[in-house]
Image: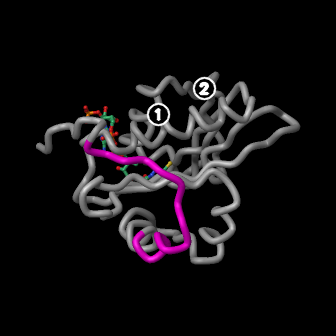
Amino acid sequence: MALPLPHTQVAIRAATPEDLPQVLEIESLAFEKHWGPFEFKASLEDIFLVAEEPAGGHLLGFIVACCCRLSRRGVILRLAVHPDSRRQGVARSLLEAAFEELRRQGLSEVVLDVDVVKGGARKLYEEMGFQVAEVISLCQEDEEESFYVMRRPL
Ligand SMILES: CC(C)(COP(=O)(O)OP(=O)(O)OC[C@H]1O[C@@H](n2cnc3c(N)ncnc32)[C@H](O)[C@@H]1OP(=O)(O)O)[C@@H](O)C(=O)NCCC(=O)NCCS
């Protein structure tokens, strides 16, 4: 199993238009239902962070979040790490950086949805302080159609 990367080996920064080809590649490896260039271009206006190797500029993963000022909540919309770089703490670093940015914007809570079938992602979020607030089932017989709404104070 891969050893955790020390934080100094993961540089977190705001995404730029030049990152989109690598982001789209990671997206295609991480999800069945993909976001396309339109969603990622629009996300450049929001909190859109990438993790990269400081030396090579090679992207390891990304996170997209937005701010709902009315409810004073942040929403994590997308999080993915390249399959070759998983279980090394990259998602943890991306989440911590997104929390910091959401706090900087004066928000007090962060929420996200995670599919019930994604047990690994749920474990990650619980480790990062999220708790299940609600279970939504779109189809009673099919677990693949169910997801958790998770929340965490900032
Ligand atoms: C979920 C995902 C973002 C995790 O990224 P990652 O960089 O591998 O996560 P981290 O290394 O920061 O994991 C931190 C902890 O979360 C838990 N965790 C993460 N992935 C896990 C998995 N597949 N199974 C079990 N636990 C997992 C572990 O406790 C891990 O700590 P450990 O490695 O010391 O045991 C990545 O697997 C991914 O991109 N998956 C596909 C896209 C996806 O499902 N995104 C989330 C949608 S809601």
Q: Is mark 2 within 8 Å of ligand 1?
A: no
Please tell me whether residue 11 belongs to the stretch shown in magenta: yes
> For the point 14% across and 44% down, which residue is it?
2
Kindly tell me whether residue 78 is visible in this rendering.
no
Expressed as whole percent of the image width and height from the top left, the position of residue 58 reads 30, 64
Expressed as whole percent of the image width and height from the top left, the position of residue 101 reads 61, 38
| Discs 2, 1 touching: Cβ within 8 Å | yes
For badge 2, the amino acid type reads Arg
Q: Which coloring applies here?
A: one colour
Q: Earlier in the sequence, mark 2 or mark 1?
A: 1
**Residue placed farthest to the right in the image?**
70
Q: Which residue is mark 1?
A: 125
**Magenta span:** 9-22
Q: Is residue 122 above or below residue 64?
A: above
Q: Is residue 44 above or below residue 145?
A: below
Element assignment for label 1: helix
- Please give left or right for residue 139 compared with residue 124 in the image: right
Element assignment for label 2: strand
> For the point 46% across and 70% down, which residue is it?
19
Q: Is residue 29 above or below residue 146?
A: below
Among the 4 quarters of the image, the one containing residue 132: top right
